[in-house]
Amino acid sequence: MDLLSAAYGTTSDEDEGEPPSSTPIATALTSFGPPPVKRPRWEYQYQPYLPPPSSFPQPPLSKAAPPPPSPASGRYVSKRERALLAASRAPVDAASLLPPQTTAEIDSSVGSITDSNLRADILHSLRCQPKPGSSRSLPSKLSVSLKGHTKAINCIDWSPTHAHLLTSAGMDHTVHVWNVWDKGNTIARVLKHHTAAVKDVRWSPHSLSLLSGGLDCSVQLIDVVEGRVIKVFKEDQAVEVIKFNPSNPNLFLSGGSKGSLRLWDIRSGLVIKEFHKSLGTILDIEFSADGKQFISSTDTTRSNISENTIIVWDVLRQVPLSNQVYTEAFTCPCVRYHPHEASFVAQSNGNYIAIFSARSPFKLNKYMRFEGHGVWGFPIKCNFSRSGRELASGSSDGSIYFFDYKSGRPLLKIEAFKEACTDVVYHPVIPNVIASCSWTGEISIFE
């Protein structure tokens, strides 16, 4: 009986479990791969042969090898021979053999990305590059209205190298590139390389390329001129936010729905650092000017642990410097460092903006806050002016609010949209120009 048990007690290939569905993240720290998948024996016997990827393009049909001849009539044909014969005659779908698409889909009605057709006053301002703080006037007049998205816009970003270009990421699965002041077509590119909503998009600091992340669990680097996908960084989570490291444009940080924070190297396509703390969904991240620290904002509503709402991280050591920065029972959809002073602000769902010291122990200023606008229920963002004197914020009522940074005093309110204003971004060159976007898919530029 023991011999029979030893002979028939082993599990056959047909009883093997399914392979794991999740794909491990490519990382420079580990070199493991997924375990080899064992297939049933009948697959080894009867699976039709498919040419390897290196054989593209396929040879003409006239040069294809002829199928094996049919067995002579009257001769017994085994089941194995019949299966092989059927497999050899089965048609192969040519589309399944094509290499993956490497070019982002571009709408046919796009315009130009050059500055050859701009308004004369704008072109003069871009070339003169006035100093930050040279104009104390606030943006108040609607300059340009841009329409193209069919759903909510999550964020917008000005190009630092080609300041007439603006990009936007939408819930309609698209990334738009706008030639804002072009006298012809303001839509320069419509990129459809994501298969789900795009949550964040950032210009490369030194080139005409974009980095975008979305709910399709990928971050993609795009050549805007050619509309070509340069590289895809696959994640195991929906990507909520991405930021370039200001001290090294070859590095970027991503945060997602599972709470993972990863530092990627664009050149190798690998994760070089990962920051672990069992967090909720990452709402926003922000690097310090020297790139040695960053702030993360996390959704802690499910864990009821408010101490992890805002964390200041040390990039080199991969450890939190403080996780008790903000202990109130509100999430913060946006965090921003001041451009010149040792402080940062956090947009709170409590309908105010809190201010903190950027030096340890990162204390909250309990005596001043920026309030009067609405945040609750929307991912409302805020941003500093180039001089740092003003702080602008979107609002759930569709308006843009301007505050004096030193005193917290409200300076101006602009009624920009009928629905929530989700993001506001100052122009990188012209000091009195600000871009804003809405929950209904509109973009408005104010001067």
Image (cartoon, grey):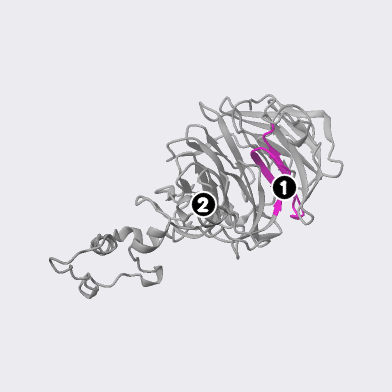
Q: Mark 2 points at which residue?
A: 19
310, above or below 254, in the image: above
In the picture, residue 396 is in which quadrant?
A: top right
- Report crowding for label 1: few under 14, some 14 to 19, many 20 or more residues within 10 A (C-alpha): few
Residue at the location (72% across, 50% down)?
A: 275
Q: Residues within 10 Å of mark 2 (few under 14, many from 20)?
A: few
Q: Nearer the viewer, residue 196 or 120?
A: 196
Q: What element carries label 1?
A: loop
- Which is more N-terminal, label 2 or label 1? 2
Residue type beneath disc 2: Pro
- Observer-nearest residue: 154 or 32? 32
Residue at 60%, 58% in the rendered image = 26
Q: Nearer the viewer, mark 1 or mark 2?
A: 2
Q: Name the residue under label 1.
A: 276
Assign a secondary structure to mark 2: loop
Give the number of marks: 2
Does residue 309 appear in the picture of this structure?
A: yes
> Which of these two is toward me, 405 or 351?
351
What is the residue that sits farthest to the front in this orientation? 1
Q: Is 197 colored magenta in this rendering?
A: no
Query: Which segment is the magenta one?
Result: 274-300
Task: Tell me the quarter of the picture where residue 251 sits.
Answer: bottom right
